[in-house]
Image (cartoon, rainbow, N blue to C red):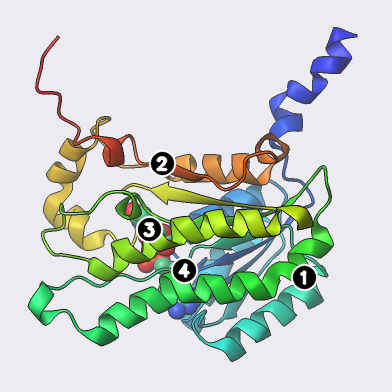
Amino acid sequence: MVEAETEQYATKALFSLEGKTALVTGGSSGLGLIMAKGLLRNGVRVIIASRSQEKCDLALSELASLGECSAMAVDVTDSADRKRLLEHVDERFAGLSILINNAGANWGAKLEEYPDEGFAKVINTNLNAVFSLTRDAVPLLSKAATVDDPSRIINIGSMDGIHVPVVQRVPTFAYSSSKAALHHLTRSFAIELAHRHITVNAIAPGFFASRMTDYVFEHFIEDIKDDCPLHRVGKPEEIVGIVTYLASRAGAYTNGTVIPVDGGTSISKGKRPWTD
Ligand SMILES: NC(=O)c1ccc[n+]([C@@H]2O[C@H](COP(=O)([O-])OP(=O)(O)OC[C@H]3O[C@@H](n4cnc5c(N)ncnc54)[C@H](OP(=O)(O)O)[C@@H]3O)[C@@H](O)[C@H]2O)c1
């Protein structure tokens, strides 16, 4: 009796993703590519999308051996591209169980030199495109959703949407504002889509190695570690872990949250002024 009752507490039952389908924007590099690998490794059929065909092809050559995957060159800020992408998802999957809004851009410059185009580009990519793609993906997500196993939207926010980043020594006004807004959009969508059995959560990563963090890792890695209570950067499996939780049965009741995965960086500057 107890054995039967606790069967559902086994990690295999709690965290299985087998048979699900996922779309990962910005899946051709960095965190997106890591998440795509993690999903495929766990039996999810995956579509990745990013602007560069070359990067998509390269990523696909790594992903193909892990499971059923396709890649599409798409600019998420372009409405015709988004439409093409969702048509591809519909053709391929006839529904969608996991949407990961991961594509992102950054821009750093001193205040007096910070261009309107840079600000607009970042807000457009990190916020506006997420709103539009998510709105238009709802019918596909609805198709795959059930009361017991809701479809999942996972937005990739940032700890920089929680605190104001300074470690990179140059202000990133648009980036941190876009991520703070994305966190709140996550909450709005969670309320809006719950009745359709779609949950919406955000992950707020700290520092992970990627093209976006190349420069800061090269110049400020000691400061980055110093700012983190755990004194290190994140590991790929720590992103796969949180995505697996949010996309699985274990995460089905988690809705409207922003989960920092940053070793505690966003809540503390890492150093305790007292000693043991
Ligand atoms: N790495 C970190 O430490 C960290 C920390 C916090 C949050 N994040 C967030 O994680 C996400 C992924 O970043 P990353 O660090 O993995 O950087 P990355 O390696 O530069 O990845 C960004 C991805 O987004 C794609 N992309 C950019 N603009 C796009 C657009 N308009 N349309 C479609 N795809 C687009 C890029 O491919 P194309 O160039 O081919 O378009 C690339 O695949 C971002 O949202 C970022 O803000 C990262």
Of badges 1 and 3, the one in the foreground is 3
Q: Which mark is residue 76?
A: none
Q: Quadrant of residue 114?
A: bottom left
What is the x, y in percent for residue 268?
23, 34
- Which comes sooner in the sequence, label 1 or label 4? 4
Q: Which mark is residue 139?
A: 1
Asked if marks 2 and 3 touch (Cβ < 8 Å), the reply is no
Give the residue type that dot 1 points to.
Pro
Of badges 2 and 3, the one in the foreground is 3
Viewer-closest of 146 and 12: 146
- Which comes sooner in the sequence, label 1 or label 3? 1
Give the residue type that dot 3 points to.
Ala
What is the x, y in percent for residue 193?
69, 58
Give the residue type that dot 2 points to.
Val
What is the x, y in percent for residue 255?
62, 45
Asked if marks 1 and 2 touch (Cβ < 8 Å), the reply is no
**Callout 1 crowding tier (Cα within 10 Å): few <14, some 14–19, many ≥20:** some
Q: Quadrant of residue 141?
A: bottom right
Q: Residue at x 71, y 53 (%)?
A: 194
Disc 1 Cβ-to-ligand 1 distance below 8 Å? no
What is the x, y in percent for residue 22?
67, 60
Q: Residue at x 44, y 45 (%)?
A: 236
Can you say whether 171 is above or below 7 in the image?
A: below
Disc 3: which residue? 180
- Which comes sooner in the sequence, label 4 or label 3? 4
**Callout 4 crowding tier (Cα within 10 Å): few <14, some 14–19, many ≥20:** many
Q: Horizontally, is 153 left or right of 241 in the view? A: right
Disc 4: which residue? 103
Disc 2: which residue? 261
State the SS at label 1: helix
